[in-house]
Amino acid sequence: MSTLLTLASTVFMLQAVPSVGLVSYDEAVRCAGLTQAASELEGGESAQGRRLYDAALYWSLAAMQAATAAGKTAPAAEADQTRARITAVRQLNAEAPEARANLQRCQQKTPKLD
């Protein structure tokens, strides 16, 4: 029930957030994968972990919205996010500087959800 309330409130907030500019489907998927991976690696106990969780939720929903606009099916969009997350886990575990820089950019583009 708590997850449903969080999802519902996030969808509402996404609708209320002023547009910061459209991003491509590829960028939304990349940010979803990076933030999901970073959230998993960080855990949800810290303030950073909670911010990453919020960012992951935002980018996942943004990627699904971009997928709809691009005419992609939900299963294809979910598979793209899964591949992006797996790739991002590997890159972040390897401390790849480009992955860290991309993660930081994704976090900067994430609207405040609180």
Image (cartoon, rainbow, N blue to C red):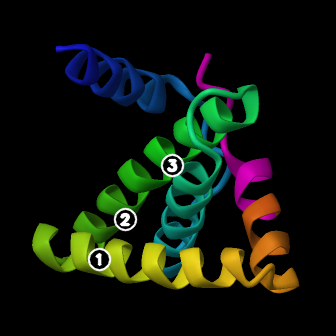
Q: Residue 26 placed where, x, y %?
A: 49, 81
Query: Mark 2–mark 1 contact, CB under 8 Å?
Result: yes
* Label 1 residue SS: loop
Q: How busy is the neighbourhood of tag 2: few (under 14 within 10 Å), some, or many (20 plus)? A: many
* Label 3 residue SS: helix
In the drawing, does residue 14 fall left or right of residue 7?
right
Q: Quadrant of the N terminus?
A: top left
- What's the mark number on residue 66? 2
Q: Quadrant of the C terminus?
A: top right
Question: Distance between the Cα atoms at labels 2 and 1?
Answer: 6 Å
- Residue bearing the label numbered 1: 70
Query: Mark 3–mark 2 contact, CB under 8 Å?
Result: no
Query: Mark 3–mark 1 contact, CB under 8 Å?
Result: no
- Residue bearing the label numbered 3: 56
In the drawing, does residue 93 fall left or right of residue 105?
left
Please give the name of the residue rendered at 81% of the width and 60% of the height, measured from the top-left corner: 104
Residue 86 included in the magenta stretch of the image: no
Which mark lies nearer to you, 3 or 1? 3
Q: Amino acid at mark 3?
A: Ala
In the drawing, does residue 67 fall left or right of residue 102?
left
Start and end of the magenta stretch? 105-114
Q: Amino acid at mark 1?
A: Ala
Nearer to us in this view, 74 or 24:
74
Q: Earlier in the sequence, mark 3 or mark 2?
A: 3
Q: How busy is the neighbourhood of tag 1: few (under 14 within 10 Å), some, or many (20 plus)? A: few
- What's the mark number on residue 51? none
Please give the name of the residue rendered at 14% of the width and 67% of the height, measured from the top-left corner: 74
Question: Distance between the Cα atoms at labels 3 and 2?
Answer: 15 Å
Q: Amino acid at mark 2?
A: Ala
